Image (cartoon, grey):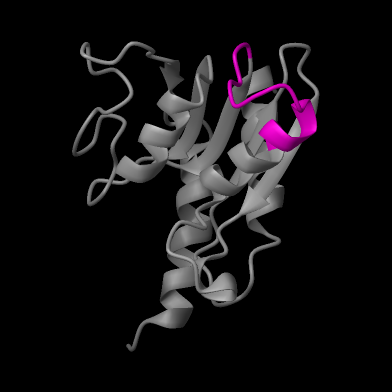
Amino acid sequence: MNADEQLIEAALAAAAQADPRDVPVGAVIVDPQGRVIAAAANAREATSDPTAHAEVLAIRQAVAVLGDGWRLTGCTIAVTLEPCTMCAGAITLARLDRLVFGAWEPKTGAVGSLWDVVRDRRNTHRPQVRGGVLEDRCAAVLRDFFAGHRPS
């Protein structure tokens, strides 16, 4: 298993901690030495906060852990699902160096599927991106969740 797959495994473990009402998306952030400094799952339903996506919560944790401002330069974020526009913007604004994600999101994805916010040439910061890592496993978690939450 390569390093990016290990990151997605850690993000899947974070997703498994989501409140049963929340879509099980997980995110982890590692520092430049590869140490996990933040892990979070979606918590919109649990917190009644529309911004409580796994990526945003992980960014907030990582900034608090590092304690030296809002920039996460040198860090990598791994998330089980292609980020939405809000999260793609937050990743860019936080100056994360890399983004690794699992499943593609054709309806709301903002890292290549519907939009490509993080690689827009007008941005002053553009992280490196690798998508589709352990895609089938990440997609299966979401399929299973929605199969249990949608009427048949």
What is the quadrant of the C terminus in the image? bottom left
Identify which residue is drawn at 50% across, 53% down.
53
- Magenta-colored span: 62-74
Q: Nearer the viewer, residue 56 or 148?
A: 56
Residue depicted at 29% across the width and 42% down the height: 109
Residue 44 percent coordinates (x, y): 50, 67
Q: Is residue 137 visible?
A: no
Residue 21 within the magenta-colored segment of the rendering: no
Residue drawn at 50 percent across, 19 percent down: 95
Quarter of the view holding residue 6: top right
Residue 64 colored magenta? yes
**Does 52 sit left or right of 152 as displayed?**
right
Can the viewer see residue 81 in this picture?
yes
Q: Residue furthest bottom?
A: 151
Instruction: State the residue in front, 43 or 107.
Output: 43
Q: Quadrant of the N terminus?
A: top right
Residue 120: name its quadrant.
Answer: top left
Q: Main secondary structure of the magenta part?
A: loop
Say whether residue 121 is left or right of residue 51. Answer: left
Q: Position of residue 23 (x, y in %)?
A: 49, 65
Q: Check the image and report above or below for 10 versus 152.
A: above
Number of labels in the image equals 0
In the displayed structure, would residue 100 be above or below residue 84?
Answer: above
Residue 71 pos. (x, y %)? 58, 21
Q: Is residue 106 above or below residue 121?
A: below
| Rendered residue at 36%/33% (across/down) | 89
